[in-house]
Image (cartoon, grey):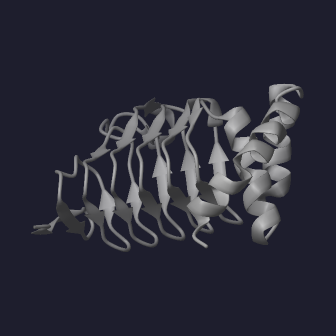
């Protein structure tokens, strides 16, 4: 039985748990999400999903958040249906992150909606301040292991980000990108 089939079967119970957890203040729900970060197996997947549904800006169905995923600023995090986020991902959504449907995010991926200014030579880098900018990941996207998505970028429908790539500009639909910085390797046809 596939994960989405299990989800459909247990959806009423999951929605009941979301209702129960929603009674708690937001900060407590965030702390519980952090507390259950390392819980393995089905129990961990269910607990993280139930809590994510109660703390995220938007949260679809059949979301799989594996152990050791760090999610900062979940109020600015939106995720569609059938999304898997594998172990050791770091997702900082201060500037807003929107993930579409049918997205797979492999282990060790970093998604940062903040960055640092560093252009001025007259000021030390640590005194130049930072910026925030939204990230959009469209439907049917695969992000390979240890890739990094930088603030202000969009990964368009049907694209693949290769392992270890650093995305510093928009990824066009149905392309495969890789490298540092990420460049088009080929088009998907």
Viewport quadrant of the N terminus: bottom right
Decide if residue 38 is in sight here: no
Spot occupied by residue 15 in the image (x, y as percentages of width and height): 75, 39
Spot occupied by residue 132 in the image (x, y as percentages of width and height): 44, 31
Residue occupying image coordinates x 77% and y 67%: 42
Q: Quick check: 167 left or right of 19?
A: left
Residue occupying image coordinates x 70% and y 64%: 68
Place residue 22 in its image quadrant. Answer: top right
Nearest to the observer: residue 74 or residue 18: 18
Nearest to the observer: residue 130 or residue 72: 72
Residue occupying image coordinates x 32% and y 67%: 165
Q: Quick check: 46 left or right of 133?
A: right
Q: Quick check: 144 left or right of 23?
A: left
Decide: is 165 above or below 54. below
Place residue 87 in its image quadrant. Answer: bottom right
Spot occupied by residue 21 in the image (x, y as percentages of width and height): 85, 35
Decide if residue 37 is in sight here: yes
Counting every numbered tag in the picture gives 0
Residue occupying image coordinates x 47% and y 62%: 105
Extreme-front residue of the structure: 9
Place residue 153 in its image quadrant. Answer: top left
Viewport quadrant of the C terminus: bottom left
Spot occupied by residue 157 in the image (x, y as percentages of width and height): 25, 50
């Amino acid at each position: 039985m596939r994960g989405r089939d299990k989800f459909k079967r247990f959806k009423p119970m999951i929605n009941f748990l979301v209702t129960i957890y929603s009674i708690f203040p937001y900060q407590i729900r965030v702390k519980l999400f952090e507390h259950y970060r390392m819980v393995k197996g089905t129990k961990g997947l269910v607990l993280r999903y139930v809590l994510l549904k109660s703390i995220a800006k938007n949260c679809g169905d059949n979301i799989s958040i594996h152990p050791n995923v760090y999610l900062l600023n979940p109020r600015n995090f939106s995720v569609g249906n059938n999304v898997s986020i594998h172990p050791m991902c770091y997702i900082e959504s201060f500037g807003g992150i929107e993930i579409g449907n049918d997205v797979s995010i492999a282990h060790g991926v970093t998604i940062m909606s903040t960055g640092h200014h560093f252009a001025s030579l007259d000021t030390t880098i640590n005194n130049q301040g930072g910026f925030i900018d939204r990230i959009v990941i469209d439907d049917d996207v695969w992000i390979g292991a240890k890739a990094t998505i930088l603030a202000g970028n969009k990964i368009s429908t049907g694209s693949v980000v290769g392992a270890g790539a650093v995305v510093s500009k928009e990824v066009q639909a149905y392309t495969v990108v890789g490298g540092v910085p990420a460049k088009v390797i080929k088009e998907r046809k």
